[in-house]
Image (tube, rainbow, N blue to C red):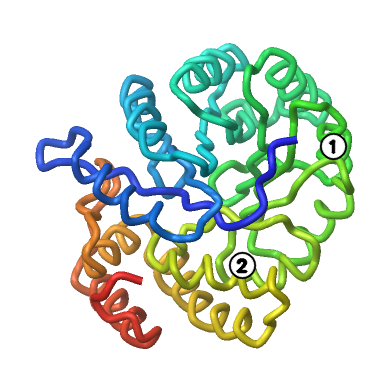
Amino acid sequence: MLDLSGVHLPVATPFSDNGGLATASFMSNLDDWLSHDVAGIVVAGSTGEAPLLQDAELFTLVELAADRIEEKRLTVGTGGESTRVVLDRNRAVAERGAHAALVRSPYYYRPAMSPAVLRDHFLRVADESPIPIVLYHIPKFVDVDLAPELVGRLVEHENIIGIKDSRGDLGGLGAFIEACGSNGQVLVGSGALLYAALEAGAAGGILGVAIIAARSAAALYRAWKDGDHARAGAMQERIGPLHDTIVVGCGIPGVKAALDRIGLYGGSPRSPLPGADDAKRKTVDDALEKAGLGIAKV
C-alpha cells in the first residue's frame, strides 16, 4: 500500500492576468512548498480550484509537479460526474507521473447516489485505475454522504488505500478510522484538527492551511511522530486559528491573499470566484500577524 503518512499540501492554482495558468509562478511556489518536510502535494484539490480547471490545464499542472516532486507523493484530484470521466483522468494523470488519485463522489444527480450506486462507481474506478484511489469526503461542497460502513467495505479493495475527510468533525473522523482499520489510511482535511486526528489514529492530513504555514504544519507532524507532544501542541495552536480564520472564514480568496502576503504567488481566483475584498485582506493580515508570521515565509 502506498504510504500516505504525513502532511500533504493541496496546492493552489495560480492564474495570470488573462485568466490562464501562471505556470512560472506555479513552479516557483512548488519549489518553496517542496523545500519543507512534507509528505507530498495534491494537485487539483478544492484549494486548487479543481472544478474550475479544464482537463488540459489539469494535465499540464501534473506534468509540472511531477518534474519537481522527486521522492515525495503526488496525488491528483480526478473526481467527476461520470465513472468514465474519472477513469480517463486517472489514466492520463498516471501517465504524467501521479502516484495516487483523490476521487470525490458524483453529486449532480444526488438522489440517485445511493450507497449501492456509489459502491459500484468506486469499485469500478478502483478496478480499472492504474494508480491507487483515495476517497474524498467533503460534504461542504459535495452533498453526498459516504457512510463509515460503505468506506469500510470500499477499502477492502486493494486499490482503494484510504480517505480524506474534510468535515472538520473529530467524531466523524474517528468513525472512518475505526471503519478502515488496517485496510485504509485516513487523512484529515481540517488544519484545526491535525494533532487530535493523529492522536486518534489518522495517518496524516491534506491541509489547505499547510500551503500558508508549511513549516509549522510539517513541524507538528514531525514533533508528534517523535513523541514531542508539547511542540506538536504548540504548532497546532499556531495553525488552528489560521485554518479557522483564513481557510474556512475567507475561503479561496483569503488563501490566495495569504500566499501573496507571505511572499508566494496567490493572485486572483478564477471567475466566477471573486478575489479578496479589503475586509478579507485585513482579516488575513490580522490572522498572520497573530500567528507571528507577518509577511515572512512560514
Amino acid type shown at disc 2: Tyr
Q: Left or right: 28 with respect to 153? A: left
Q: CA distance from mark 1 to mark 2?
A: 29 Å
Q: Can you say whether 160 is above or below 71 in the image? A: above
Q: Residue at x 62, y 54 (%)?
A: 166
Horizontal arrangement in the rendering, residue 247 relative to residue 7 (left or right): left
Element at label 1: helix
Tag shown at residue 231 = none
165 or 35: nearer the viewer: 35
List the residue tagged with mark 1: 150
Residue tagged 2: 221
> Where is residue 265 drawn, in percent x and y?
22, 55
Work out whether 222 lies above or below 38: below
Q: Which of the image's four quarters has the N terminus?
A: top right
Position of the C terminus, as image quadrant, is: bottom left
**Mark 1 residue crowding within 10 angstroms, few (<14) / some (14–19) / many (20+):** some
Foreground pick, 91 / 164: 91
Q: Are marks 1 and 2 in contact (CB under 8 Å)?
A: no
